[in-house]
């Protein structure tokens, strides 16, 4: 009989975990605490202790980069989708692959522990609680996939005087809409994506917004060259092989050319690739119009105001919003392998423990990529499912431990020291590293001899999730067509009016020249490295 797998959480990682287990012939049961699928993307007014997006949230990654690899997002959907479109896509995915019947809703996992016969079977004992009846149930599973992500527990810094502040204090975890802050004076602390979005939204209805940041940030725009989504422009294999020093220099010049970050009080000391990206199209406009004022870090609070580290003081503050990130933990897992210290874990590729006798438990969607998480979660699930059914094997323990140590060392050298930068991964490199484990990394040299046009598209074009369905286990016959028709889906939602002026065809020639220059840069860079 096939093995039983428990999936914890029916968010973007959990639903694809169900599908990948079914693809490998495994029996699967998913436990979801709420009454809906979608996790953070299932917007709800009553959060019931769970996080979700703002009512106004638009995704920071485009639809072609964030889709599951065998289920393209409809061409009529916007390139950068409002959360309602994302939830609609996720529900469609669940219906298309008939996943809902494997989910037990309003069921909370209370404990996961090794079964009495773990040493011989690798099984786990999972205790759940029905949130309606309060009935607890314990069952045995051959494997467990933890799909709870890392946006679990809001991090609240202990600023001097914060407890005495008489205004309201809330975390972006609880923030939904800005309407209760009309004509109020607001301080937003933290310049990550949530902080930037909250400051921009509040600046349209509040009397004044102060945006406090310790380090500053480099700002990326969703709209890239020629109006294309920025991530399909920059997420390309030929660019990924450039040295980080060169990529940092090129990125910095490009971002500074678009916006003088020093003039706007945003410029950080670190390079663009040394911190998680801030994607925001509107923040510079709100600063330029005076609706948002950038301030340094908070020194202390008074009963009515905030003093910043540069000595400036803002009084009559009505509300403070903490956009200060999250900590994560696994309190329901009775296993030392899942101990989290300062937001750090010792998991092989942020998925598997290195010290267990049996590779029958893992986390999915924990890594924080420089790109979309959905394809990463999917590839992790494909890998884990094949491990569970013995179609793939983990490396020896010393090799995995060396990999974990190297990842931590590399991260500490590259990124600024922050609890946010403990699980960072580069999108293409990480996807390739997982793909190698299960034999689905596209072999471009082999592909070049059979389909040179497709090989060139995979190398010079966007590194789309479909590339990991071209060959190997789980190959999808529609992958090639999905790659070749990408631009049709990108352009489709924009074709709402036929311009009177004909399109300038010189763009193709310019792009060809750009690729030629890129080739030259790569060649010179490789000579320097060698």
Image: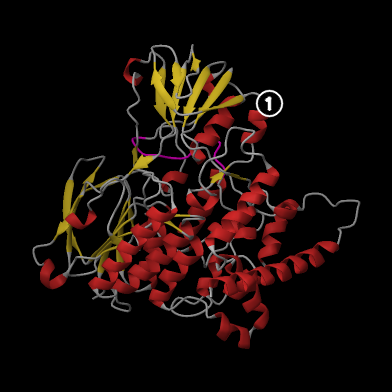
User: In the rendering, at what x and y percent does residue 269 appear?
Assistant: 51, 42
Q: Is residue 264 magenta?
A: no
Left or right: 430 in relation to 222? left
Say which residue appears at 63% left-offset and 56% top-offset: 250
Magenta: main secondary structure equals loop
Provide the residue designation for mark 1. 289
Looking at this rendering, what residue extends furthest in the left direction? 116
Q: Is residue 77 left or right of residue 59?
A: right
Residue 470, located in which quarter of the rendered image?
Answer: bottom right
How is the protein colored in the picture? secondary structure
Camera-side residue of 82 and 132:
82
Q: Residues within 10 Å of mark 1 (few under 14, many from 20)?
A: few
Q: Is residue 164 above or below residue 499?
A: above
| Residue at (61% x, 75% y) in the render | 480
Q: Give yes or no for residue 50 being in the magenta stretch.
A: yes
State the image coordinates of residue 198 (x, y, percent, origin top left). Answer: 52, 32
Q: Write the start and end of the magenta stretch as one range.
A: 48-58
Residue in front for this viewpoint, 345 or 253: 253
- Furthest-bottom residue in view? 449
Residue drawn at (47%, 15%), measured in percent from left and top? 318
Question: Is residue 73 visible to us here?
Answer: no
Quarter assignment of residue 73: bottom right
Residue 284: x and y in percent read 64, 35
Q: What secondary structure is found at the residue carrying circle 1? A: loop
Image-based side of 91 in relation to 255, left or right: left
Q: Is residue 227 visible?
A: yes
Between residue 88 and residue 164, name the one nearer to us.
164
Image x and y of residue 137, in percent: 17, 51
Residue 479 to residue 368: above or below: below
Quarter of the picture holding the N terminus: bottom left
């Amino acid at each position: 009989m096939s093995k039983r797998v428990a999936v914890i959480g029916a968010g973007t990682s959990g639903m694809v975990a169900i599908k990948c287990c079914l693809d490998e012939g495994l029996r699967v049961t998913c436990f979801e605490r709420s009454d809906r699928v979608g996790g953070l993307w299932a917007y709800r007014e009553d959060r019931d202790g769970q996080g979700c997006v703002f009512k106004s949230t638009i995704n920071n990654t485009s639809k072609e980069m964030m889709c599951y690899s065998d289920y393209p997002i409809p061409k009529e959907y916007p390139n950068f989708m409002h959360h309602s479109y994302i939830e609609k896509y996720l529900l469609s995915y669940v219906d298309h692959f008939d996943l809902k019947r494997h989910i037990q809703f309003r069921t909370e996992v209370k404990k996961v522990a090794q079964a009495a016969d773990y040493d011989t079977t690798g099984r786990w004992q999972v205790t759940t609680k029905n949130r309606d009846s309060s009935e607890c149930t314990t069952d045995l599973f051959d494997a467990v996939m933890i799909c709870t992500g890392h946006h679990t527990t809001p991090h609240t810094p202990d600023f001097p005087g914060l407890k005495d502040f008489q205004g309201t204090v809330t975390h972006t975890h609880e923030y939904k809409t800005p309407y209760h802050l009309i004509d109020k004076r607001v301080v937003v602390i933290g310049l990550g994506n949530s902080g930037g979005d909250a400051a921009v939204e509040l600046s349209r209805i509040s009397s004044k917004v102060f945006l406090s940041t310790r380090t500053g940030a480099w700002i990326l725009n969703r709209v890239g060259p020629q109006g294309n989504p920025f991530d399909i422009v920059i997420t390309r294999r030929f660019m990924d092989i450039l040295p980080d020093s060169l990529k940092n220099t090129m990125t910095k010049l490009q971002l500074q050319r678009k916006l003088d970050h020093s003039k706007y009080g945003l410029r950080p000391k670190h390079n663009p690739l040394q911190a998680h990206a801030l994607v925001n199209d509107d923040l510079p406009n709100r600063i330029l119009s005076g609706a948002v004022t950038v301030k340094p870090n908070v020194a202390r609070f008074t009963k009515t105001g905030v003093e910043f580290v540069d000595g400036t003081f803002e009084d009559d503050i009505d509300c403070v919003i903490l956009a200060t990130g999250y900590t994560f933990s696994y309190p329901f897992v009775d296993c030392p392998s899942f101990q989290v210290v300062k937001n750090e874990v010792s998991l092989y590729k942020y998925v598997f423990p290195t010290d267990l006798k049996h590779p029958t438990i893992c986390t999915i969607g924990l890594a924080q990529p420089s790109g979309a998480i959905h394809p990463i979660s999917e590839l992790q699930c494909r890998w884990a499912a094949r491990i569970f059914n013995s179609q793939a094997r983990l490396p020896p323990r010393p090799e995995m431990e060396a990999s974990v140590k190297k990842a931590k060392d590399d991260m500490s050298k590259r990124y600024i020291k922050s609890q946010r930068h403990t699980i960072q991964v580069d999108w293409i490199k990480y996807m390739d590293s997982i793909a190698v484990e299960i034999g689905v990394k596209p072999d471009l040299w082999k592909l070049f001899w059979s389909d040179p046009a497709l090989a060139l598209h995979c190398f010079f074009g966007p590194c789309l999730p479909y590339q990991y369905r071209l060959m190997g286990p789980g190959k999808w016959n529609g992958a090639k067509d999905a790659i070749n028709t990408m631009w049709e889906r990108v352009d489709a939602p924009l074709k709402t009016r036929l311009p009177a002026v004909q399109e300038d065809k010189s763009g193709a020639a310019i792009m060809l020249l750009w690729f030629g220059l890129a080739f030259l840069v790569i060649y010179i860079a490789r000579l320097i490295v060698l």
